[in-house]
Amino acid sequence: MAREVSVSTLERPTQVIIALLAALIVVRGVVAAVTPLAFDEAYYWQWSKNLAWGYYDHPPAIAFIIRAGTAIFGDTSLGVRFVPWVLSIVATVAIWRAGAILLESEHAGALSALVFSAMPMIGVEMLVATPDAPEIAAPAALFYVLAKLVQTGNGQWWIAAGVVSGLALLSKYTGFFLGLGMLFWLLVAPSQRRWLLSFWPYLGGAIALLMFAPVVLWNAGHDWLSFRLQFGRVGSGGLTLRYLGEFLAGQLGLASPFIAILGVAGLVSIARSRDPKLALVTALMVPALVFFLWQSLRSRVQGNWPSFLYPAFAVAAVAASLSPALQKWKALRWSASAATPVALVMSALIYAQAVFGIVPVREPISRMLAIGIGRVTDDIEVLRAQNNAKAVLTTSYEMRGWLSFYLPTKPPVIQVNERFRWLNEPLPAADTFEGPLLYVTQIRNDQSEMLAKRFREVTPLAHIGRSRNGATFDEYRVYRVDGPTGDPLDYGT
C-alpha cells in the first residue's frame, strides 16, 4: 500500500516524472501570465466585479476565484488566471496521491499526474479562468478523498467528500454527476455497500447541498434563470447520429489519441476485473459518460463538458499502461510508449501558438484569445475622442468583456441586448445615453438595424481588423450612435 512520502525518497524515474510535472506547471503559469484573455474569461471577470450567488450561465465559484486573483495581481491576465493556476497544482497533487493509493505504486501515482497534466484538455482548461478550472480541481480532490476512504476505512473522509462536492456544485451544475457517481460506486462495489447503512455519506451529502443552497435561493429570486438555461438542455433535440461522432472525435483530440486509447482500455479492463479498489475509477465516470453519450444522440455536447471526468480517466489510462494482461496487445504497448510524449507535444504546440502565433493562419486559438486586441481598442479610443462619446455600446457579451478589460481609459461599456446576463450589476445611469455613443460589433454579429429602432442616428465610422502575423482573426464595425427614441436597452430573453 502506498504511503505518504517525500520526493527525495522516491526512485529516480519517479523523480524525473515529478520534475517534468513541475516544469509543466511553471510553463503553464508563464503562458497564463503573458497571453491575453479569452472572451469568456473577460465575461467572468465582469462577474467578479459584482459578486453574487448565481449568474445566468453558471454558479458563482469562478467569479469569486477571479476576484481573489485580481485582488493580488490586479486586472491583468495573471490576476484573472492566478487561482486557476494554483488549482491546477492542487489537482495534480491530488491525482498523484489518489493514483498512488489505488494503483499501489508511487511511480504509478506520479505517472497518473503527468498523464493528467499532459492532456490538451487540462493544458487549456486549467490555464484559463473559466468554471471548468474549479470543476476539474474539485473532482480531482474528491478522487483523492475517496481513495483515502478506501485506504483507511475512516468514515470522517465523507465530510471532506461533502465539502469538495459542494465546491464542485458551486463551480458547474455537472457537479451533480459526482454525487451520482459516488452512489453508483456504493451500489456496485460490495466492499463499500456498508456505507449505505452509515450516517457518514449522508452527512457528506447534506454538507454539499447546504453549500449549494445559496445558488438555489438566487435562482428562486431570479425566475430560476440559470436552472432553466442549463437543465433545459437535457434531452433537447430529436434523435440523430449527427453529433455522436463529433463528440467522440473531440474527446479523442482533447485527451490526445494514445491517452484516449489507454483510458478506454483501462475503463473496460477495470469494469471486467471488478477490482474492489479500482471500481472507484469507473463508477465516478459512468453516470456522466452515459448522459453525455445519450445527449450526443440528440444535440451537440461541447468538448469541455466532460473535462471533470479527466482526473479519473488519467488513472484509468495509467492502469492500462501498467497492466501485464493488456500488454499482450501491440496497439496498447505502442499507446503506452507514445501517450505522454504525444500529449506533451500537442499541449506545447497549443501554448506556442497562443504565445508566438507560429502558424500565421486564422485558427481557433488566436481567435478565441484577445490576440491583436490592442490595435482594435486603440482605434476605438481615437474614434471615441473624436466623437466625444461617453460610452461604448455592444450587442454581444464577448465584445463587452474584451472592451471593458482592454479599453485603456475604461469608459462604460454596455451590452444593450441580453440584459439577463447582467442582473447582478446596476443598470446604466440614464444620462449615459445622452449625447454621442459608439457602437462596436463584430461584422458577423452586426445588429445596427436593431439599434436604428432605438436611436435616431446610427452612422458607420470605421472597419477594424484584429490580426497577428498577417492573419486576420476577426473584423469589427464601429458606428456613431445618438438620440435615443425610447429605452435603449432590450430586456428580452
Image (cartoon, rainbow, N blue to C red):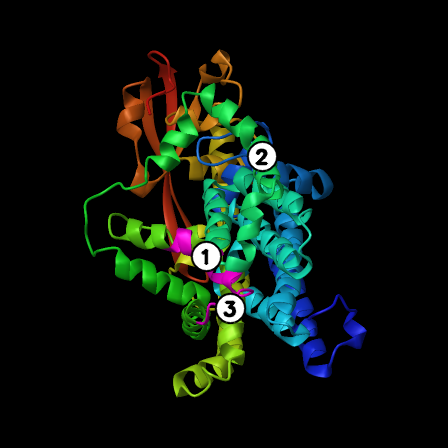
Q: Is residue 14 left or right of residue 261?
A: right
**Height in image: 422 above or below 320?**
above
Q: Position of residue 409 (x, y in %)?
A: 59, 33
Decide which of tag 1 and tag 3 comes sooner along the chain.
1
Residue drawn 47% across the image and 42% down it: 176
Query: Which residue matches tag 2?
Result: 206
Q: Nearer the viewer, residue 412 or 203?
A: 203
Q: Which one is earlier in the sequence, the residue at label 1 or at label 2?
A: 1
Query: Residue, x 79% and y 69% (percent of image)?
Result: 6
The residue under label 1 is 188
Q: Foreground: 359 or 467?
A: 359
Q: Nearer the viewer, residue 416 or 121?
A: 121
For the C terminus, give its image quadrant: top left
451 is within the stretch colored magenta? no
- For residue 275, the mark is 3
**Discs 2/3, front:** 3
The kind of secondary structure element at disc 3 is loop
Magenta residues (range): 273-289
